[in-house]
Amino acid sequence: MGGAAGPQLAAAVSNAGGLGTLPLWWHGTDIVRQQVRETRQLTTRPFAVNLNMEYPQAERLEVCLDEGVPVISFFWQDPSSLVSRAKEAGAIVMHTVGNAADARRAVDCGVDIVVAQGWEAGGHVRGTVASMPLIPSVVDVVGNVPVIAAGGIADGRGMAAALALGASGVWIGTRFLASKEVAIHPEYQERLLAASENDTVHLENLFDGGWPDAPHRVLRNSTVTNWEKAGRPPPGQRPGEGDVIAHAASEGDIVHYLSYTPEPDAVGDIEALALWAGQGVAMVRKVQPVADIIREINAEAEAIFQRLAK
């Protein structure tokens, strides 16, 4: 969820009984420490920090461990170089995978929890397999290691389905983009609420930011449409490439195709920015406090299992 998930959202999720997660993989170590401490001021419950292994993360990991972060979540590339260090410090280690082979490798290097991310997920997507076939495939190869299901899950029905497939829990992103605690631009949120299951598109590397070969899923917008009309040209030849289309105090000038989550202080052509969203967006229809979202998802899943048990 990029910049959308700050201390307020992460703490709200943890306070409501989930595991809030801070994506801090691109921040300087001072900001990593600051955001961890801000989160600690807002919750006494466990939370996680997500680190993208496409980039060097040893220094950020040390800050997290020094601050006593209880759960470290790794993403993208092989995390084996840092898993043992995190576990030595007493952290629980999670790693996100897109196929069963990567899940097995993650377990072999000592990961405590595997996140199976289906192709339906919003934002950056690790694999090409949908959640329904991926979850049981991962469950079958990891033995007793818990599996968290991600991708396209936005309500209690998705949670119940994931648990029925052998998952121990669910990782939800898009639904929380419609929370009161999230830090996104109002226009981005409005477009999420109006979107259908057909309104997202999976792209190989359109909204980039120096992160090569990073497929992602976003809401279809004018940037996507104009790029497709131009014949899907590669980076360096895309329509309007390098043009400044927005500005934010926290980011400065925002150029076309930048991998940037539209934050509340952004001004400019918000519609043309990267509007991350998963295929579960059709189930996101109202803005709610995080606690109400989690309560609703849990209650719906429990009702389904009660009905099926009759």
Image: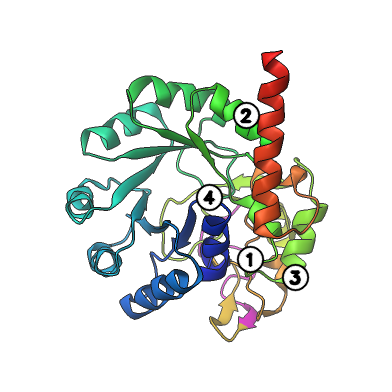
Q: Which amino acid, mark 1?
A: Val
Q: Residues within 10 Å of mark 3 (few under 14, many from 20)?
A: some
Q: Earlier in the sequence, mark 3 or mark 4?
A: 4
Q: Position of residue 54 (x, y in %)?
A: 33, 56
Q: Which amino acid, mark 4?
A: Gly
Dot 3 lies on which element? helix
Numbered label attached to residue 186: 3
Numbered label attached to residue 182: 1
Q: Which amino acid, mark 2?
A: Ala
Is 234 magenta? The answer is yes
Q: Which residues are magenta?
A: 231-247
Q: Which residue is mark 4?
A: 18
Q: Which residue is mark 2?
A: 160
Q: Nearer the viewer, residue 18 or 194?
A: 18
Q: Earlier in the sequence, mark 2 or mark 4?
A: 4
- Check whether the beta carbons of the residues at disc 3 and disc 2 lie within 8 A of each other: no
Q: Position of residue 224 (x, y in %)?
A: 68, 56
Mark 3 vs mark 2: give the one in front: 2
Identify which residue is drawn at 80% across, 50% down: 285
Identify which residue is drawn at 51% across, 30% down: 129
Identify which residue is drawn at 30% across, 66% down: 64
Q: Earlier in the sequence, mark 2 or mark 1?
A: 2
Mark 4 vs mark 1: give the one in front: 4
